[in-house]
Image (cartoon, helix red, strand yellow):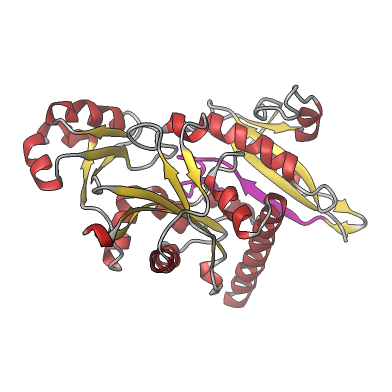
Amino acid sequence: MARTRLLLLFGGQSAEHEVSCTTAAHVAAAVDPDRYEVAAIGIGTDGRWASVDPAAQLAARDTAGLPPRLDPAGTATEPSAALTTAATGVVADEPLELVVLPLLHGPMGEDGTMQGLLELAGLPYVGSGVLGSAAAMDKSMARELLAAHGLPQTPGRTILAHEIPKVDAAELFADLGPVVFVKPANMGSSIGISRVDDPADLAAALDLAASYDERIVVDASAVDHREIEFAVLGNASDGDDLRVSVPGEIVPGADFYDYEDKYDDGADLLIPAPLPDEAVVEMTELARRAYRVLRLDGMARVDFLWEDPAAGGRGPLINEVNTIPGFTPISMYPKMWAATGLAYPDLIDELAQLALRRHRAKTAHRRTSR
């Protein structure tokens, strides 16, 4: 069987650039070389594209046996030329089959922009399409869509950057409670998030979030909660019976699961999370529902705040949904699948096959509609 070319897109212009470079190194090293030929395009923080040789970088391994990141610098290229070149060629006398794996966390990669470019280029790619990516990335819009379908969340509100001077801190805290979380609507990896328990600190937290996005989400804090996550796999648009992993629990080392906890190994990760069976069943179904409501494909990680009903809590509350979750060695998404019985290389293979199947279905629909 001819190998498939797996094209990694990594780096990008968001504040999560370094996270993406780290993820790309580990994905490139984990891919089964008998099934996939790995190519890569790095995108610099200035938006410039470059063809990168991941095999050469992996060959120059450090003492730990793996480079900590792929370097997005390489042979400069234009986006259209890079994608055309990657899709050209044959493998073992068979037409080349290409799958693009976007590893671009945050804006300009996870928010539907890159997905739109790949749609125009007619290339199969891993993950959700334009609408699902944009809806899940924007925490304000995701909140509205999930609320419209009756899915449980903490109370919250959206504030535009230009409205910050008019915000009444005392009124907001009276409405949402004694502790709030202030976050940019379009950002990940806990970047730009503040935990605020003093109204006097609200303006600074809003300004920090506004430095990343024009829309700011202010969420009420859950009460005596635990942070629970599930990994979801499948194409909702194809009617798949979505697969959901065992639950994982994050025990933050700080006041909340911040950037340092996520990438400096500061939090404790419990997989599977010790939960009552009925709680696992309920959250598994809620994860599937959220995935379908947001029209997602390929993969996503659904994050919950869980208040124990036995202690008077409200049960599961959806916190957010991530369509390009981290793939670093300490990332929850691959860890949860490994604990469910799907190893890292097999997970990458399954995502690639989901992308190809989805692309074929979309191509068939386009032909039929002409």
**Left-right relation of 271 to 32:** left
Work out whether residue 203 or residue 133 is closer to the camera in this orientation and state it.
203
Image quadrant in which the C terminus is located: bottom right
Look at the picture and state if 74 lies above or below 131: above
Image quadrant in which the N terminus is located: bottom right
Is residue 242 visible in this depiction of the protein?
Answer: yes
Percent x, y for residue 63? Answer: 75, 22
Residue 356 part of the magenta-drawn span = no
Look at the picture and state if 50 lies above or below 121: above
Going by the picture, which residue comes out furthest to the right? 93
Quarter of the image where one finds residue 217: top left
- Give the main secondary structure, helix, strand or loop, of the magenta stretch: loop
Q: Magenta stretch: give its range.
A: 96-114
Work out whether residue 223 or residue 220 is closer to the camera in this orientation and state it.
223
**Left-right relation of 191 to 173:** right
Going by the picture, which residue comes out furthest to the top? 63
Percent x, y for residue 9? Answer: 63, 41
**Left-right relation of 265 to 197:** right
Residue name at image x 28 percent, y 57 percent: 153
Residue name at image x 21 percent, y 52 percent: 155
Quarter of the image where one finds residue 60: top right
Is residue 80 visible in this depiction of the protein?
Answer: no
Residue name at image x 15 percent, y 30 percent: 198
Percent x, y for residue 100? Answer: 66, 50
